[in-house]
Image: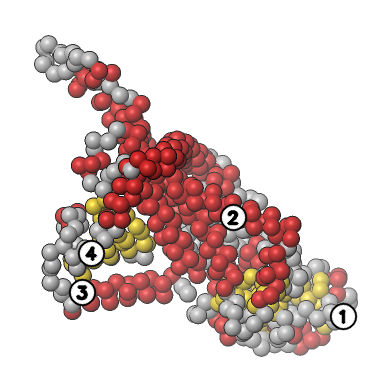
Amino acid sequence: MSFFHVFTLILLFWVIVHIIHRIYQPTRVSTLLPTLNTVAPRARLLWAEKSTILTLNKANLRIQTNAFNARHDYLAGKFKDRRFARLQKGITTFYNIGVAAGMCGMVLGLAVLFWATGSSLFDAFITAPRPSNLSKRDLTSTDPETSPAATLIQPIIPGVTVPLSHLPIILIAVFLCQIVHELGHAVAGALSSVPILSSGLSLTFIIPSAFVSFSAAFMNPLDAIAKARIIAAGPWHNLVFWILLLTLAKVGLVIETTSGLGTTLMSVCWKDVSQEGRVVVGIDNDSPLNEVLHIGSVVNALDDVSLADKEDRWSEYLTQKSSESIPWYGWCVSKQTFQASPDDCCKDGNPTLDHLCFDSLGPLGKSCLNPISTLSNSTDILRCHRETDCGEDAACIWPDSPILRLSVKGQDLILWSGPRKEIWEQVSIGRYAPRFWFIPASLLGFFTNFYDYLQMATLSLFFFNLLPLPHLDGAQFLATVLEYFLVPSLELGSTPMDVESGISTSQRSGPSAWRRRLENFVQLFAVWLVVLYILLTAMKLL
């Protein structure tokens, strides 16, 4: 599915939502939500009942409820109960560790962002141009020419760096990780007896998110450590979730290595075809390959590159931007046959499945031949690299236009005349083929990709949310950390006054003022780093 089709579907969805709102005008009902005033001024009520409201504001759909407030209050009550004092102490220690992890994550995130942006800036304007490291890839492929900066920050852009078909999986993974994130804020808030005003979900264009709203009247009086626990709890949950996923993968690998249990169980429903090639597990609906390639087919080779390998030759070959490093071999055909063939398709530039323009490496010029029979990989057709490889009576020829050959098990050769990357975008492949017809070929690949994106999303949310950017946890966390470490010493005693102006020196240039200046400087620095990195990334894509 192309970007145009995806955008059209998204646009159609929002048009239908707005039409429904126009047709069904809900009557406003009194709600128990104290957060109605926090909704955007231009947001329109789409649906409401006593504890839940659904609002619409252009391309933002938001549902918020206080249905879970009682459960949160119940949890806060348990934490205050003396019978659970040991549990409260353990959970407090857990979230205190989260504060320390948050500080490390903020410093590390800023350092990595600064280094990656500096490296990209150096590569873009100082060193010689190099191939973009944002080539399309799968989750496991690596690029030996990738710059060190790209190994730390790898943008996941559907249709650009990963297949567009992965977009739903990415959105689901990010949404689940956001729920884990907000649960961290909610539990840490209950630990400090801070009630939530509401919780909910929102959809902005196509990006889903979750949120929890706390009462400022209860948050502001808290000491810096308690506030830091609540703020850092979200990213801390993401990091713990990532560690859990990584541990499960390691444990599974150990079990598989020692007992082979995973392979045994998988072999009941799937078979490994990596010794033959790669099985097709998905094809875009609008792809022209739908007519000749089918889900479940086994692709043995791309041109002369065999896919019967454990390495991901598919992505490596299809995403290469330059063909200079790709070995090539021509085909030997009879000079008499080549000279007797017409050359009309070479002149009008309209090749067909029956006639394709071929160029000889020698002085014979160009002729039109049947590409299927000519480019066949059968053993009786000689391959050549030079004119002399074919002998005196034969010529070494090569397609005049870029042609990609797909060798598929049990069917004729498939020829592709478009960019190789389009095959990578439109076709999904895997190592395992289902043994039974009722098992979807894409099922195993879906779970594998979902697990990989889940790991990426939760770790990314940990670092990204800790960046001191406006409207993110990092900005509030930075303010709270500075409040703790830069407590004005003047507050402990009397406040000296400037006799001439009548203004206290602490108000004019005291530690509080310096703290605010430092906070603003760090936030501005982080914003400029992010903006610069995005611009440099866009330049590489263009």
Residue 333, above or below 384: below
Residue 524: horizontal and vertical position, in percent?
34, 38
Residue linked to disc 2 = 248
Which residue extends farthest front? 83
Which three-letter amino acid code belongs to the residue tagged 4?
Thr
Pick whichever of labels 4 and 2 is earlier in the sequence. 4
CA separation in Å, label 3 and label 4: 17 Å
Which three-letter amino acid code belongs to the residue tagged 3?
His
Which three-letter amino acid code belongs to the residue tagged 2?
Leu
Q: Please indicate whether residue 149 sits to the left or right of residue 304 in the image.
A: left
Residue at horizontal 52 percent and vertical 51 percent from the top? 242
CA separation in Å, label 4 and label 2: 37 Å
Judging depth in this view, the residue of 248 and 344 nearest the camera is 248
SS state under label 2: helix
CA separation in Å, label 1 and label 4: 83 Å
Residue at horizontal 74 percent and vertical 65 percent from the top? 309
Numbered label attached to residue 21: 3
Would you call the spot at circle 1 few (<14 residues within 10 Å), some (14-19), or many (20 or more)? few
SS state under label 3: helix
Residue 458: horizontal and vertical position, in percent?
47, 52
Judging depth in this view, the residue of 320 and 49 nearest the camera is 49
Pick whichever of labels 3 and 2 is earlier in the sequence. 3
Residue linked to disc 1 = 393
Residue at horizontal 30 percent and vertical 52 percent from the top? 74
Residue 316, above or below 359: above
